[in-house]
Amino acid sequence: MLTCGAHRFPLDRTLVMGVLNVTPDSFSDGGRYFAGTAALDHARKMLDDGADIIDIGGESTRPGAAPTSEREELARVVPLIEKIAARGVPVSVDTRKPAVMQAAIAAGATMINDVCALRAPGALEVVAGHSVAVCLMHMKGEPATMQQNVTYTDVVADVKIFLVERAAAAEAAGITRDRIVLDPGFGFGKKVEHNLVLLRRLSEIVALGFPVAVGMSRKSTIGALTGREVGERVAGSIAAALAAVARGAKIIRAHDVRETVDALKVWRAVQEG
Ligand code: 7PJ
């Protein structure tokens, strides 16, 4: 069972988290949902397509991205969270900043998706003070430089040690287990070979005992394996998602919700048959 505020997910099937970027510079859909009602329309479409959670991000964390000010990030995400959460939809906010977490929760977000795993001073306390869920993600380094000189002796061991430590920190701060999700952070300070090993051995992360989320949708590893540009990576992304589900992933973070939901329906029917 995953508790996201008033929303409770039994986790008897894989959840799909639809990505809604409201940034001018996100790698896969930067600028597209930045103006007018476009973001809201896209959220509505993802919900029609079967998304369980809408993940709203106002800061690009792509390799080399420039940082976004707190003020700017708040202006991008808060009005949107209010509108979407008001419909009773589970909303996650993709942020590293405690002040944005706080404002997002006040606006109705019921999940905090933090690529820094609540390492910013004050972040643990903000989440602990509410009944929201949190996704703790592994990242090696900082977005600006994370893809430079990446080395690991055992990437799976490093990710596991980090996630265990962050989950313990979260629990020590008062965040109950039913609110914690772990994510190995595909592409965050990882080369293609690291991402592949992490995916191949994802069961080891699942064995830590928390629901595992994965986000490989449209990422450069998919591009490297298929030779496709960002907009042509749906099939590759779905193959990666199914490989993750086969190893026990419970949440798939995806841009192409309709295709991902269809693939999961077929997958589930086969498993249950
Ligand atoms: C991830 C994320 C991921 C989680 C991004 C993109 C790049 N959050 N935020 N996991 N990636 N939990 O939009 O593909 O892999 S930003």
Image (spheres, rainbow, N blue to C red):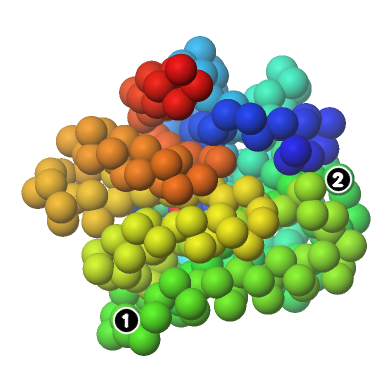
Kind of element beneath mark 1: loop
Query: Which residue type carries mark 1?
Result: Val
Give residue 73's position: percent from left, percent from top.
59, 52
State the CA–CA distance, disc 1 to disc 2.
Answer: 36 Å
Asked if residue 240 is positioned above or below residue 231 in the image, the reply reads below
Kind of element beneath mark 2: loop
The residue positioned farthest toward the front in the image shown: 273
Give residue 17's position: percent from left, percent from top.
53, 35
Residue designated by label 1: 150
**In this rendering, position of residue 69 left or right of residue 6:** left
Q: Residue at x 74, y 21 (%)?
A: 88
Q: Quadrant of residue 6?
A: top right
Residue designated by label 2: 131
Looking at the image, can residue 122 be seen?
yes
Q: Residue at x 29, y 61 (%)?
A: 196
**In this rendering, position of residue 44 left or right of residue 255:** right
Q: Residue at x 89, y 62 (%)?
A: 174
Give residue 61's position: percent from left, percent from top.
44, 60
Evaluate if marks 1 and 2 touch, with contact meaning CB atoms under 8 Å apart: no
Front residue (pair 203, 23): 203
Q: Quadrant of residue 69?
A: bottom right
Mark 1 C-beta to ligand 1 under 8 Å: no
Q: Residue at x 64, y 41 (%)?
A: 92
